[in-house]
């Protein structure tokens, strides 16, 4: 009976998942103790890249902070006013305290609390043609893929209002479905669901259509989909590829199917990869098939791009749920990063505080809810090692310009 009471108590006290975007923030009582453990130059660069992306449609026209709404134009003015203040950390912090308000995020278990993971740009060997080692293609978006705008249908027909909740797109909170346009024997063409991962990989319906960007190792291909972008080293050249679209099925993390071989508390990208490499190709694919989502890529000319359109900045770019948190905004993050005992260790020996300023620029299939973020680590070996073990609680505040400040700079 006592055990049952404890269970019921914990369930009753559990924090309800955030559903209403209007409840994503609350005004903080004051500013946290500000500090930054990264070079100031990287903050300048992140600010510059954020501002350059303000013409992108994925940066919303209005930012909502609890009861306040700030227009995109006003927030842009506020960020522009920050640029000359970045001569020193002290000057920047003084300016922020005077002219900005701090807002706590809804949080995972409590206000302000976030659960942080990490992502990075992997580098992998590849081939322009299929080989025994490089047997998995990286595909462009197929030309017969179409997007069905469910919100538009709901707007035209109130009886279809429920369609606004039908969101399964990996990089979107907008109600759309992806499908495949097929010819009908009679009448107009029709849209049917696109192929799932198992169909794409096992049946190869996209083969021979000139969609292959490169061929890589199957495990590398799967990890590249999770990260969203990376570099493929081909003979004599390198190409950078980034997320373009996906097949319209929800992302499912494969780690939940490996708890019989990897304890949950030890689950990491490194441990999952090490296990996959011990398996025959067929068993690897059986695990991959648990995730029906499949990502299509495009070639990138510069750095990897975020959902907002901004180029990534190592240690400064974060991904969050775009339903609740607006892209193109400034936030302060208190978090810990791993410290490894040597250059080859896969597991850290300690975690140390590494507070910093970040910009919310990205989103992701697994980054959902009011207390979940993903920190971009970079594109080198150390970035991969840190991202692989990142599962840490922290605290985060978003910043909104004060009305009095906006009145001065309009």
Image (cartoon, rainbow, N blue to C red):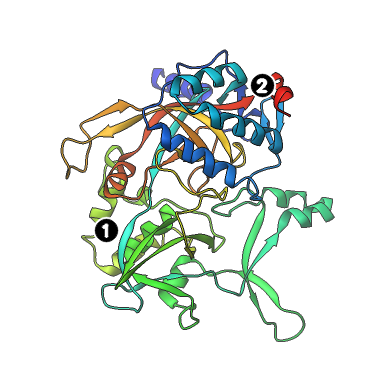
Q: CA distance from mark 1 to mark 2?
A: 51 Å
Q: In x, y percent, where is residue 255?
A: 35, 49
Query: Left of 170 or right of it: where is 269?
Result: left
Depth check: give the residue in front, 155 or 44: 44
Q: In x, y percent, where is residue 317?
A: 47, 41
Q: Which residue is mark 2?
A: 402
Which residue is situated farthest in the bottom direction here? 185
Q: Quadrant of residue 131?
A: bottom left
Name above or below for residue 116 compared with residue 141: above
Front of the two marks 1 and 2: 2
Q: In x, y percent, where is residue 361?
A: 53, 43
Q: What residue do we see at 68% from left, 21% from top?
A: 405
Query: Left of 22 or right of it: where is 9?
Result: left
Q: What residue do we see at 17% from left, 43% from top?
A: 343
Q: Which residue is mark 1?
A: 276
Callout 2: SS? loop
Task: Return the disc, 1 or 2, that comes first in the chain's sequence.
Answer: 1
Q: What residue do we see at 44% from left, 75% from top?
A: 212
Is residue 23 shown to the viewer in this render? yes
Name above or below for residue 307 compared with residue 410: below
Q: What residue do we see at 48% from left, 34% from top?
A: 358
Callout 1: SS? helix
Depth check: give the residue in front, 352 or 53: 53
Q: In x, y percent, where is residue 112?
A: 51, 24
Query: Left of 164 or right of it: where is 208?
Result: left
Is residue 21 shown to the viewer in this render? no
């Amino acid at each position: 009976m006592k055990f049952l009471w404890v269970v019921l108590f914990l369930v009753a006290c559990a924090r309800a998942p955030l559903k209403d975007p209007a409840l994503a923030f609350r005004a903080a009582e004051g500013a946290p103790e500000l500090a930054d453990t990264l070079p100031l130059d990287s903050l300048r660069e992140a600010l510059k890249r954020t501002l350059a992306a303000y013409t992108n449609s994925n940066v919303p026209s209005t930012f909502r902070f609890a009861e306040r709404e700030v227009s995109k134009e006003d927030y842009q003015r506020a960020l522009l006013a920050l640029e000359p203040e970045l001569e020193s950390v002290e000057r920047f912090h003084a300016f922020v305290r005077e002219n900005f308000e701090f807002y706590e995020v809804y949080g995972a278990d409590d206000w302000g609390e976030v659960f942080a993971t990490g992502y990075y740009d992997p580098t992998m060997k590849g081939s322009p043609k299929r080989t025994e080692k490089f047997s998995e293609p990286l595909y462009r978006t197929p030309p017969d893929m179409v997007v069905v705008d469910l919100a538009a249908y709901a707007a035209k027909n109130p009886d279809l209002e429920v369609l606004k909740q039908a969101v399964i797109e990996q990089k979107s909170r907008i109600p759309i479905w992806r499908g495949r346009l097929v010819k009908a024997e009679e009448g107009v063409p029709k849209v049917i669901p696109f192929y799932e991962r198992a169909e794409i990989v096992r049946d190869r319906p996209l083969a021979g259509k000139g969609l292959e960007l490169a061929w890589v190792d199957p495990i590398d291909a799967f990890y590249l989909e999770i990260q969203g972008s990376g570099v493929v080293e081909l003979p004599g050249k390198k190409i950078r590829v980034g997320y373009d679209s996906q097949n319209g099925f929800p992302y499912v993390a494969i780690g939940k199917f490996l708890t019989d071989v990897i304890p949950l508390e030890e689950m990491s990208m490194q441990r999952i990869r090490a296990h996959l490499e011990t398996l025959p190709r067929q068993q690897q694919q059986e695990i991959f098939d648990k995730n029906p989502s499949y990502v299509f890529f495009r070639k990138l000319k510069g750095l990897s791009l975020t959902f907002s359109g901004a180029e990534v900045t190592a240690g400064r770019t974060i991904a969050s749920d775009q339903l609740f948190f607006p892209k193109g905004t400034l936030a302060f993050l208190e978090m810990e990063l791993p410290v490894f005992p040597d250059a080859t260790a896969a597991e850290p020996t300690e975690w140390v505080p590494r507070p910093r300023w970040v910009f919310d620029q990205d989103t992701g299939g697994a980054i959902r809810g009011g207390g979940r973020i993903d920190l971009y680590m970079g594109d080198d070996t150390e970035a991969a090692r840190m991202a692989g073990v990142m599962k840490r609680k922290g605290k985060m505040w978003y910043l909104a310009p004060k009305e009095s400040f906006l009145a001065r700079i309009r």
